[in-house]
């Protein structure tokens, strides 16, 4: 019996393998295809090649941080409809505003409850990115 193909794709960009595993576990019930990146450079590359429906992006990563990766992603038309969410410990008002100003659609603070992350991701996948 062939397994059904995931309807939605989520890219999680985080240099911490444990966080990527927690996200994978939290999102498993949604039956999304999960892609992983360990830094901002990989995240940009994966986003451009796979055009995921949603990206979970850490801020503190090697090579290129999440804010710089976000700005780069938002400069590409092919990612215009991609929902991008900062998933990070960077939770100050300044960090949240920087994310918004750079094009983030939402901001989720780590540590997170698996059910809260799953519900938020499901809501964002259903709603999509607001048109400008």
Image (cartoon, helix red, strand yellow):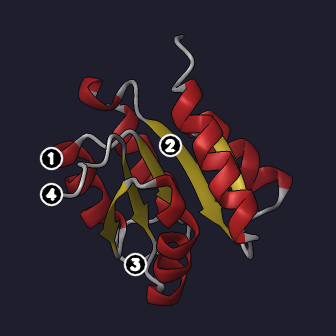
Residue 29, percent from left and from top: 52, 61
Q: Mark 1 or mark 2: which comes first in sequence?
A: 1
For the point 20% across and 46% down, the residue is 50
For disc 3, the marked residue is 62
Report if the CB atoms under discs 4 and 3 are less than 8 Å apart.
no
Q: Residue furthest top?
A: 132
User: Looking at the image, is mark 1 or mark 4 nearer the viewer?
Assistant: 4
Q: Residue furthest right?
A: 93
Q: Nearer the viewer, residue 95 or 109?
A: 109
Q: Mark 1 or mark 4: which comes first in sequence?
A: 4
For the point 27% across and 23% down, the residue is 77
For the point 57% across and 18% down, the residue is 130
Residue 25, percent from left and from top: 52, 75
Can residue 105 be seen from the camera position used here?
Answer: no
Q: Quadrant of the N terminus?
A: bottom left
For disc 4, the marked residue is 2
Q: Is residue 107 above or below residue 63?
A: above
Q: Residues within 10 Å of mark 1 (few under 14, many from 20)?
A: few
Q: Mark 4 or mark 2: which comes first in sequence?
A: 4
How far separated are the C-alphas under marks 4 and 3?
39 Å
Report if the CB atoms under discs 3 and 1 are less than 8 Å apart.
no
Can residue 102 be seen from the camera position used here?
Answer: yes
Q: Nearer the viewer, residue 17 or 120?
A: 120
For disc 1, the marked residue is 49
Report if the CB atoms under discs 1 and 2 are less than 8 Å apart.
no
Q: Secondary structure at mark 3?
A: loop
């Amino acid at each position: 019996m062939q397994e059904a193909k995931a309807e939605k794709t989520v890219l999680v960009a985080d240099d911490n393998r444990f966080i990527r595993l927690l996200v994978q576990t939290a999102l498993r019930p949604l039956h999304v295809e999960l892609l992983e990146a360990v830094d901002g450079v990989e995240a940009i590359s994966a986003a451009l090649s796979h055009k995921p429906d949603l990206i979970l992006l850490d801020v503190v990563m090697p090579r290129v941080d999440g804010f710089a990766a976000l700005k780069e992603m938002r400069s590409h038309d092919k990612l215009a409809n991609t929902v991008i969410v900062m998933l990070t410990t960077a939770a100050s008002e300044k960090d949240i505003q920087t994310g918004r100003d750079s094009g983030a659609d939402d901001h989720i603070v780590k540590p997170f409850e698996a059910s809260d992350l799953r519900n938020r991701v499901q809501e964002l996948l259903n709603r999509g990115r607001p048109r400008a």
